[in-house]
Image: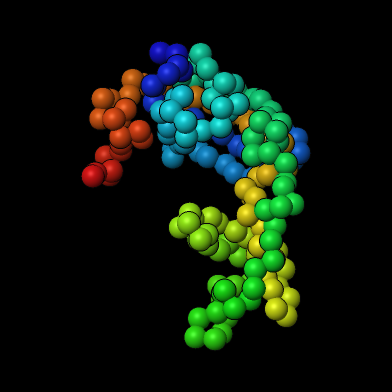
Amino acid sequence: MEISKNKVVEVAYTLHYDSFSGEVAEQVKSENPLIFIYNNGHMLDAFEENLKGMKKGDSFKFKIDCAKAYGEVNQNNIVDVPKNVFEVDGKIDEKLIFKGAQVPMKDDQGNHFDGFIVEISENTIKVDFNHPMAGEDLFFEGNVVNVREATEEELRHGHVHSHSCHH
């Protein structure tokens, strides 16, 4: 069975930055593969396009330029937030708020964002709201573990159901 629209795809891969021999950003083993419904809007278009037509057992090796992945780093998404926003009872919990920490935040309209703390100064905390892989070319190599038809329920719900997934 070929990878195409509404197929459940399972892949194992290694994702590198900079080159196929560069730093490993993520590794997904075949014992616990990435599982998704193809062409369902949850994966990068360029990732799916490189897998199109493949079958169980096929190997892949491809690069996705940052423009087709998570884009360039947008300096407008790196903002200084008043330090008091992070205070609880007038204090900052240094176990939660430190350089490099991922912090969930919400804007005035109730939209949720994850940010990464870049710098802590006397009155502000600089938070980067870019995707962590923004500005990176992505180098994937791996194999197709399985391909199957999505069930009607999976298509209705928009995600793959496993044995442990119940609604």
**Does the image show residue 30?**
no
**The C terminus sits in image quarter:** top left
The answer to whether residue 57 is left or right of residue 74 is left
Residue that lies at the very extreme toward the front in this rendered image: 109
Res 135 → quadrant:
top right
The residue at 28%/25% (across/down) is 151
Can residue 89 be seen?
Answer: yes
Residue 77's place in the image compared with 133, above or below, is below
Q: Nearer the viewer, residue 126 or 94?
A: 126
Residue 64 horizontal/vertical position (percent): 67, 30
Position above or below: 119 against 154: below
Q: Residue at x 59, y 78 (%)?
A: 84
View extreme (bottom): residue:
90
Q: Position of residue 91 (x, y in %)?
A: 56, 85
> Relative to the observer, which residue lies in front, 84 or 29?
84
Nearer to us in this view, 38 or 17: 38
At horizontal 63% and vertical 60% (from top left) the residue drawn is 116
Residue 131 location, x and y as percent?
62, 48
Q: Residue at x 73, y 76 (%)?
A: 121
The colour scheme used here is rainbow
**Residue 122, percent from left and from top:** 73, 80
Which image quarter is the N terminus in? top left
Q: Picture quarter containing residue 92?
A: bottom right
Rendered position, 76 above or below 156 = below
- 77 shown above or below 33: below
Where residue 137 sits, quadrant-wise, is top right
| Apparent side of residue 1 relative to residue 60 in the rendered image (left or right) | left
Q: How many labels sit on residues? A: 0
